[in-house]
Amino acid sequence: GYVHVVGLAGTGRGVAQLSASPTSLSFDPVQRGQQSTPQAFNVSNNGSASVSITGVSTSAQFTALHNCATVAPGASCQV
C-alpha cells in the first residue's frame, strides 16, 4: 500500500491534545480514473480544551471529508 500524510489545521484555547487512530492508512493500487475504497480515521482530543478543526489536507490526490467543526475534550471525530 501507499502512505499519505493528512494535515489538520485549527485553533484551540487551553491545552488540546489531538491524536489520530489509526496513525496510517494503506490504499490498494487502482487503475487510473477508478476510486479506491473509502477509509476513515478518528481524531481524538485527549486534552482539557476544545479544538476547532478548520481544514483537512492530504499529501496526495485524495479527498478528505469530515464534519469535525469542534472536538471537545474527551471527544472524537471521524475523518
Image (cartoon, grey):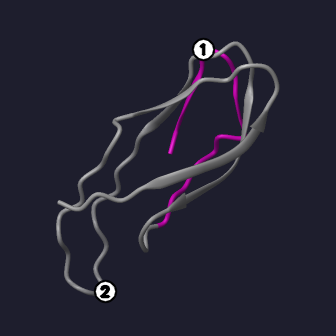
- Identified at 39% across, 45% down, the residue is 40
Q: Which mark is residue 33?
A: 2
Residue behind mark 1: 74
10 Å neighbourhood of mark 2: few (<14), some, or many (≥20)? few
SS at badge 1? loop
Identify the image quadrant of residue 16: top right
Vertical placement of residue 48 versus 66, above or below? above
Identify the image quadrant of residue 59: bottom left
Q: Are marks 1 and 2 in contact (CB under 8 Å)?
A: no
Residue type (three-letter) at the residue carrying disc 1: Gly
- Identified at 42% across, 56% down, the residue is 5
Q: Is residue 67 left or right of residue 4?
A: right
SS at badge 2? loop
- Identified at 60% across, 20% down, the residue is 75
Image quadrant occupied by the N terminus:
bottom left
Whole-percent x, y for residue 64 in the image: 51, 59
Does 75 appear in magenta?
yes
How many numbered badges does the structure rendering display? Answer: 2
- Cα separation, mark 1 vs mark 2, equals 40 Å
Q: Tell me which segment is drawn in magenta.
A: 63-79
Identify the image quadrant of residue 67: top right
Q: Residue furthest front?
A: 15
Does 68 appear in magenta?
yes
